Image (tube, rainbow, N blue to C red):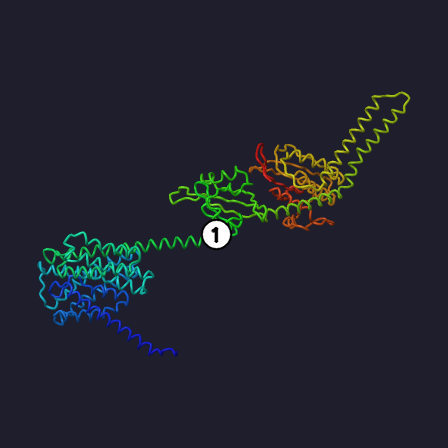
Amino acid sequence: MKPLLPATRATWTAARTLLALALVAAAYLAAGVLSLELYPVGDGLAGIWPAAGIAVAAALILGPLAAVGVLVGDFLFGLYAGWAPIPALTLAVGSVAEVLVAWLLLVRLIPIDIRLKRTRDVAGFVVMGALPGALLCIALRIGLLALLGNSYELNAENMSGLIIGFVGHSLGILVVAPVFLAWTAEPKLPRRRVEFCLLLLATAILNVIGFSVTVAAPGSAVLYTIFVAVLWAALRFGPRETALVIAITGVFATWAAGSGSGPFMLSNQNESLISLSLFLFVATATALFLAAAACERDLYLQRVVESEHAQRALIDQMAEGVVTLNVDGRLDFASQRFCMLCGKSETQLIGLRLTDLFEDAGPSTIESLPTAVLSGHDIETEVSLTVPEHGSRTLAITARCLTAADGRPTGTMAVVADITDRRRAEERSQQHLRQLAHMGRVKSLDEMAVAIAHEVAQPLTAITTYVQAALRFLQADKFQRNSVQEALDGASSQAQRASVIVARIRAFVQDRPWQPTDLLVDDLLRETARFAEPEARQHGASLALAPGRSPCRVHGDEIQLQQVLINLIRNAAEAMAEQGKSLRQIVLAAQLTGDDLVDVSVSDTGPGIEAGQREHLFEAFCTTKKNGVGIGLALCRSIVEAHGGQLWAETPATGGAIFHIVLREVRHGQLTAN
């Protein structure tokens, strides 16, 4: 299909606009004629003026151009009511002002949604749409008629007509406009069409009963049965259907008041009109506000459900499982991921306690978790869970308290992460580090072979000397028992010394698992000094312990920490030997810092560390030695970091280098963890 030319498109637009204005004029004229037929009050006035509602609705739907259709329709009605052309046109101008004021207030000043699904839109429509425009319309009509020379005295009769006009226009806008606005915005029939038809039928029946001359007398309670249909429409459907029910009720009520039947059969027409107006105003405002409140409630509930679905979808996409517990410590929600971790369905999990799931975790930790969380403490713990067909899993649980708007605890939310692979990777990493450390100790032993041989040779030589002396004493003519005993005691002492040296070497070089214990730092330094002193002496260096060492404990593996210290001592001795320093001194020290930390340092009087090498000193394969590989310091840092500490170096202004090993202090009686 070929697209329309611009001229053709403009012609069609103009034709549609003219047709819409013609429909507005025709609807306005028809509504005015109908109102005169239903409830005439004289002088071309009607008890209710539904044409005003059509005019305001047309302006809010079509825009201010709808005022042209209103002008034509009101002018034709004026002629129909017997007014001369000039006064009829004057009255029509007042209706146009009413329309334009309503459009200006409800579109420009306080914009509303014409679906009237919010209470603020209903309030704006009632206050700014129905009242100001009607008041301005009547006032403008009086003024224009006065300018045209028509005498208008503000007597009791004219005041009554002024009030009737204002009330009629206001009720016309209030009762009729919402029907056109709501159904134009959403023209489709409701989904519950059968119920909708039953609603309309019930509305008609209740109106016939409520406004019947034979059933409903003035002040009869039967009139209030109409509110059954109003409540039905407001709570089960919405503003569209509610506005339609009110419009139907308005037609029946106007007919009853105009025909002098039903509950509005009062002493005179003014009292009947006031009673009808109050009834329609209360019924319409109540119904519209109730329908809007019901829509807001439904929208709020829908958003809550959508938010819950979105949160559920987000939670189900998480790699961690999420559960919530009520104040009794029982599960009331479990995500899909948590169900997968436990190997159970959500139905099987709801209502269980954590102790029913994590039996291997120890009751003290799990049983106290909900209570501790509800008291305001965030909890982090690890548990083990055995799942059929999947074996044992290690789970990390992070729990925190859920609170209501007033701060009252309402339950517990726990995020459960499967850290089985992470723990296995850490174990493998620890195993690799242990193997690498073992290789480093074997290499260190190889490099210390000469010093160790000299260390072992001393007690062996002494043993030989003591044994030879004992033999000479035994071969002598005069047997000297005390001398033989002294020689054998000396040989035994040196044999024990050799045994201690060999045991120390074997423990150092042995490949064994991680064995962390609480260590006295002073004992660690002394044992390290005994082991490393021969090699330091071989390089012409002295190894000493600094005086005034702080008595403190650390938690770690003794052999691995000794390995770090020995590596640093050997590096210091070799560096001083290569530089040919005359003063070769290595000092081991330990002191407490302000943050419950222990600073173990190895200082020397060597050449120090160049600034360019300090940044890469602990990187793998970075070395300053001619035949070095660059693994020692990198391995030392890995060992220290595996102990939760730090290893760093500095070059003081006085020269030399200081390597610091900073570990967490373990106080007496404090619990330690791997």
Residue 114: x, y in percent? 29, 61
Left or right of residue 632, residue 241 in this image? left
Residue at point 11% right, 65% down? Answer: 43
Residue 246: x, y in percent? 23, 59
Seen from the viewer's position, the closer of residues 429 and 266 is 266
Residue 95: x, y in percent? 19, 66
Seen in the picture, residue 522 relative to 268 is either above or below; the reply is above
Image quadrant occupied by the C terminus: top right
Seen from the viewer's position, the closer of residues 215 and 2 is 215
Seen in the picture, residue 355 relative to 485 is either above or below; the reply is below
Image quadrant occupied by the N terminus: bottom left
Left or right of residue 109, residue 143 in this image? left
Number of callouts: 1
Left or right of residue 563, residue 154 in this image? left
Q: Amino acid at mark 1?
A: Ile
Q: Which residue is mark 1?
A: 315
Seen from the viewer's position, the closer of residues 258 and 274 is 258
Residue 207: x, y in percent? 20, 58
Seen in the picture, residue 286 relative to 598 is either above or below; the reply is below
Corner quadrant of residue 637: top right
Seen in the picture, residue 45 relative to 301 is either above or below; the reply is below
Secondary element type, mark 1: helix
Task: Classify mark 1: residues with Cα within 10 Å, few (<14), some (14-19) or many (20+).
Answer: some
